Amino acid sequence: MSAHGDPIPMTSTACGPLTGIAEVPGDKSISHRSLILGAMCIGETTIEGLLEGQDVLDTAKAMRAFGADVTDHGGGRWSVVGVGVGGFAEPDGVIDCGNSGTGVRLIMGAMATSPIVATFTGDASLNSRPMARVTDPLALFGCQTVGRTGGRLPMTLVGAKEPVPVRYTVPVPSAQVKSAVLLAGLNAPGETVVTEAEATRDHTERMLAGFGANISVVDTDEGRVITLKGQPELQPQHIEVPRDPSSAAFPVCAALIVPGSDVLVPGIGLNPTRAGLFTTLREMGADLTYENERTEGGEPVADLRARFSPDLHGIEVPPERAASMIDEYPVLSVVASYAKGQTVMRGVKELRVKESDRIDAMATGLRANGIDVEDGPDWWIVTGAGHGNVPGGAVCASHLDHRIAMSFLILGMASQDPVRVDDGGPIATSFPIFEPLMQALGAQVTRSTA
Ligand SMILES: O=C(O)C1=C[C@@H](OP(=O)(O)O)[C@@H](O)[C@H](O)C1
Ligand SMILES: C=C(OP(=O)(O)O)C(=O)O
């Protein structure tokens, strides 16, 4: 089933060269944070280029339920009139975050130190994902949780009436956990200190500083130590959301594997905590260049140019790079299928607790399409068939996971036989224009009967 309706079976058939300009939508991580931080200011935050994917729309709806005035002005322009730090109202109904781990975990953090009660739920995928990783540190602030066995949604949070600041070391590499603790720390008096052994995406830290919070980040032997002074008065901002590197990954990877392709993907955020895929692809021999490198809104940005790359070869992806490309492993495994030799991916246990078990979903679907994949608890190895030799021909389950659906559709763009996915509906959570954008480049992606 699709995340929000009937399943949408889709087929991808080998196509001629992909050419043109691929303007991918706004960054999903920054879009969620723009709405949530906007809701925590007094005054009006304006946003340009907001991702209007279902995940972010569900966060917008949630911010309204907590009392913020969120308006869609059309064309990706939005405004949020916030209620201030600690000003969240108690929602009347259940907060449904749909398919979005980022949405639910960040919102739980944002409400955990206010004296209100809120109940959260999501779709079948989200309701099977671990939430104790967030509710455990939120309990240290004084927030109570009642949920299903195993720390799953639906669950109710009773926000702390008299929150205390927290010192917390994040036990898994997760920007969502780090961000939930920082957002909770906003309404606790004194200093909240979060340590992460491995650097994860740092949008929350950068944006909190932009909104006027007193926040510092220090690199130590234990990792990154983030100190936030509680109870600031956040200042409303104007935010221009950069285009999403995780969405850019799809047209970029498609261009690398389809003979004759030459695609420009302009204005992509290349924050080092997000850009690991592009480094990896270049190490694999991809013809991928950064043009017009510049800084926008404090973030490094470039236009990516990807051309067909006939000499791709497998590599061992450094495990310490995993956090900076965590959402891109599914599509990397597709490029690895077209490379010569083995692509070895280790230190990626977190892939098993995303919208689906992404190692299992990709390994099963790639094997069905004639690719050799081995996998273990926190590793997997793809043995490439090389250009022209990827059989294809299978129907793949997308498991309510947008990145799995898009990855298999990319696989079919250069395989011997078409590749089908049982449900492309979840693509709308993060990349609602994927289908027309890829078609405009020359891809043959169609809705079909599976
Ligand atoms: O903070 C964020 O915006 C995100 C963090 C990552 O999740 P984890 O924190 O679970 O690694 C990533 O997979 C997700 O797509 C977005
Ligand atoms: C993991 C993802 O998102 P989330 O955790 O927000 O559901 C993703 O977009 O790949």
Image (cartoon, rainbow, N blue to C red):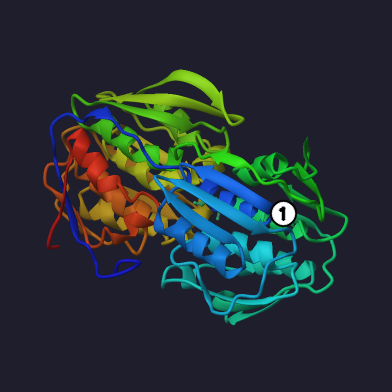
Q: Quadrant of residue 310?
A: top left
Quadrant holding the N terminus:
bottom left
Q: Which residue is mark 1?
A: 182
Q: Residue 222: tell me if it is visible.
A: yes
Residue 401, image x, y percentages: 37, 59
Quick one: SS at disc 1?
Answer: helix
Q: Is residue 289 above or below residue 400?
A: above
> Farthest right residue?
190
Q: Quadrant of residue 17?
A: top left
For mark 1, does the 10 Å Cα neighbourhood hold few (<14), some (14 to 19), or many (20 or more) residues?
many
Q: Is residue 173 above or below residue 212?
A: below
Q: Amino acid at mark 1?
A: Leu
**Total labels drawn:** 1
Q: Along the horizontal axis of the image, is 418 left or right of 133?
A: left
Q: Along the horizontal axis of the image, is 94 left or right of 383?
A: right
Q: Along the horizontal axis of the image, is 277 left or right of 309?
A: right
Residue drawn at 33 percent across, 55 percent down: 427
Residue drawn at 39 percent across, 28 percent down: 266
Q: Residue 286: tell me if it is visible.
A: no
Residue 203, image x, y percentages: 61, 43
Q: Is mark 1 within 8 Å of ligand 1?
A: no
Residue 170, image x, y percentages: 70, 55
Residue drawn at 61 percent across, 68 percent down: 66
Quadrant holding the C terminus:
bottom left
Residue drawn at 57 percent across, 63 percent down: 63
Residue 247, image x, y percentages: 39, 42
